[in-house]
Amino acid sequence: MRLSRRGLLAGLGSLALPRAALAIEQHRFPVAIGARRIAAFEPRNPEKRRFGPLTFRGGLALSCGHPRFGGFSGLWRSVDGRELVSVSDRGYWLTAKAAAEGGRPIALADAEMAAILGTSGRPLSRSGLYDAESLCIANGVAYVGIERRHAIVRFDWGAQGMEARARSVPVPAEIKRLPRNRGLEALGVVPGGPLKGALVAVAERSGKQDEPTLGVILGGPKPGLFKVARHDGYDITDLAFLPSGDMLLLERWYQPLRGVGMRIRRIAGRDLKAGALLDGTYLIEADLGFEIDNMEGLSVHIEDGRTILTLISDDNFSFLQRTLLLEFELA
């Protein structure tokens, strides 16, 4: 079966496809993505569409036979929502066109993947910077967060797209001292206000259980470090800014014997500043009684005046997990 084969290839890694992997890392390549529609966010209550201030528009369970497909942790959609870009844990870009019908997602078309290129033009994964966990694109520049190296790299996306080479973004020493597998999981560019144009990054978890996690404002007139309160064992997995300047945080909770949970927190943009301890209100919370998985990517776009949130899950290249794409409208 296709899922079993993909899981096997993922598990064997370089032993399974040494030459094929080398070949596909050199060029962009098309991928055919299957999409099973998700009509209800809460299967036990299929008529329910409103969840707090969010209305579920629909979702897709994505599948693909290519061994590089999966592990998506960062997400961006264009201003009109038609273009979608994601990055994977293994250092690959995914681009596609989002198709909709009656305001609900139905497919991803014209999908392509390519290895993320390092400064030398070689795949980023060969430099050890393979754990791409966050993504944002603003003003023609794509920023990618590399979790295990606590690094941020930038790309001339507007001019070169997936052919662009990485350039390093300097980060404070405090970021470099983050725990190895608890690094930068969330990136966003402030859309307006006194911090307009600044790059904001937040670590998944920088301390013990429920201790605040570290964030940083890079560039702009008022750079510096801040902290984000954490509650109930949830970790930060992504962020996105609303047009108002408020920041949305995607959070994930996981325990092997109890499953996974996700929620979204809204933090007032006026509170974002160096030295702050940020907290906010939760818009939605869901567990395995809902159509979720390991939700790790979040984006915001405006469609006909409506604010749309899109989430993507990281399947960890496991046949036990799914790659989900979910859409909500924010009231």
Image (cartoon, rainbow, N blue to C red):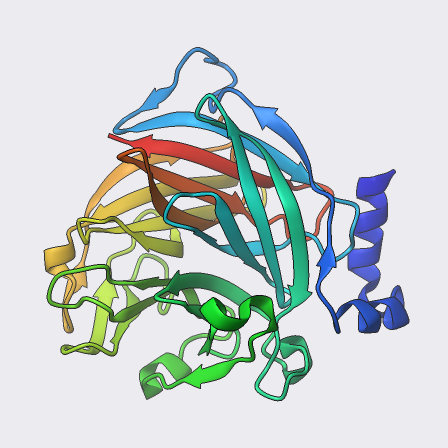
24 to 263, vertically: above or below: below
Residue at 80% x, 49% y: name it: 6
The quadrant where residue 215 appears: bottom left
- Left or right of 70? Residue 26 is right
Q: Is 182 situated above or below 108?
A: below
The percent coordinates of residue 206 (x first, y second) are 36, 69
Vertical relation: 321 (above or below) 291: below
Any part of residue 204 in sight: no
Q: Nearer the viewer, residue 11 or 109?
A: 109
Q: Which corner quadrant of the image does residue 121 belong to?
A: bottom right
- Image quadrant occupied by the N terminus: top right
Q: Residue at x 15, y 51 (%)?
A: 268
Residue 189 occupies quadrant = bottom left
Q: Is residue 208 left or right of residue 198?
A: right
Counting from the top left corner in percent of width and height, residue 164 is at 56, 75
Quadrant of the image for the C terminus? top left
The residue lying toward the viewer, choosing from 79 and 200, is 79
**Is residue 46 among the parts visible in the rendering?**
yes
The residue under the point 11% across, 67% down is 194
Residue 70 place in picture, x, y as percent: 66, 52
Q: Is residue 126 above or below residue 270?
A: below
- Residue 197 coordinates in the image, percent (x, y): 24, 69
